[in-house]
Image (cartoon, rainbow, N blue to C red):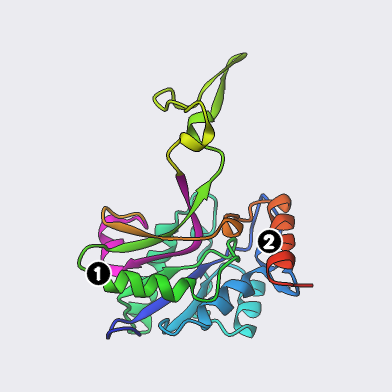
């Protein structure tokens, strides 16, 4: 809790994965991938509850062993490829309100595929959004991308053409305005705003800048190997 506001961290982790089989429980530097996000949430000074929404009994057991709450098994209809993040989180909010009589003012979405969090990232983000709650309804973690959008291409038949012809590429890369991507270190939003706007990017959103080494998300084995070696290099993991 912070300033009388209750905060829940929600970690979505379905059992199926096309890019990397069983990635949420694949061992990463000595513990299952999902454990890194659970531990990040549990070390926060402000988060009142860390929970996992999953359709997998195996993931649920592992999550409980690392200290997360798993009050339900997610319905299969919310664990297929067409299920949206909003529908999954709304199901969680409704369950807590209707079944457990618990309500939270803020939601912290922690994606298990983004384990490269620094110790104070989450609490710094919570403090920032609370201090600016009159101006903003959400905060996301941003990392600078080095492949600038102005140089991106697409194929049209046998031709290579600009992906977005409206973007003019500067003659020197350093002259381009910086571009950023919202990595999954954390998304924090007022519960009321999420239900109204149905997006983690509402109209009034601010940001928390992350470091270069944190700008990775695990979608396949190459991402996994990259993050594993980053952890070994940056955090002296074995």
**25 within the magenta span:** no
Q: Which mark is residue 133?
A: 1
Whether residue 69 is visible to the viewer of this picture, yes or no, is: no
Quarter-of-image position of residue 17: bottom right
Which residue: 32% across, 63% down? 138
Q: Which residue is mark 2?
A: 23
Quarter-of-image position of residue 167: top left
Which residue: 64% across, 52% down? 219
Position of 69 with respect to 35 (left or right) is: left
Quarter in which the C terminus is drawn: bottom right
Q: How many marks?
A: 2
Quarter-of-image position of residue 55: bottom right
Q: In what element is the residue under mark 2?
A: helix
Residue 160 lies, in percent from the top left, at 58, 18
Residue 63 lies, in percent from the top left, at 61, 78
Which residue: 66% across, 68% down? 33
User: Which of the two residues, 58 or 178, is positioned nearer the viewer here?
Assistant: 178
**Cα distance, mark 2 to mark 1?**
35 Å
Whether residue 79 is situated above or below residue 27 in the rendered picture: above
> What's drawn in magenta, residue-wise?
179-200
Quarter in which the N terminus is drawn: bottom left
**198 within the magenta span:** yes
Of pointers 2 and 1, the one earlier in the residue sequence = 2
Binning the other alpha carbons within 10 Å of mark 2 as few (below 14), some (14 to 19) or many (20 upward) gives many
């Amino acid at each position: 809790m912070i300033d009388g506001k209750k905060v829940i961290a929600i970690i979505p982790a379905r059992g199926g994965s096309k890019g990397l089989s069983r990635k949420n429980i694949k061992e990463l530097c000595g513990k299952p991938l999902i454990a890194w996000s659970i531990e990040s949430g549990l070390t926060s000074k402000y988060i009142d509850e860390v929970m996992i929404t999953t359709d997998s009994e195996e993931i649920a057991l592992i999550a409980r062993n690392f200290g997360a709450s798993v009050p339900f098994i997610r319905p299969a209809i919310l664990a297929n490829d067409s299920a949206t993040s909003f529908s999954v989180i709304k199901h969680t909010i409704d369950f807590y309100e209707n079944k457990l009589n618990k309500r939270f003012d803020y939601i912290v979405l922690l994606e298990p595929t983004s384990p490269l969090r620094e110790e104070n990232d989450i609490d710094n983000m919570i403090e920032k959004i609370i201090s600016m709650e009159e101006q903003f309804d959400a905060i996301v973690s941003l990392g600078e991308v080095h492949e600038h959008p102005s140089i991106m291409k697409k194929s049209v038949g046998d031709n290579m053409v600009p992906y977005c012809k409206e973007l003019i590429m500067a003659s020197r890369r350093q002259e381009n305005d910086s571009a950023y991507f919202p990595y999954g270190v954390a998304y924090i939003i007022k519960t009321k705003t999420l239900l109204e706007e149905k997006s983690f990017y509402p109209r009034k959103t601010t940001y928390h800048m992350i470091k270069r080494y944190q700008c990775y998300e695990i979608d396949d084995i190459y991402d996994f190997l990259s993050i594993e070696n980053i952890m070994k290099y940056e955090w002296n993991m074995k």
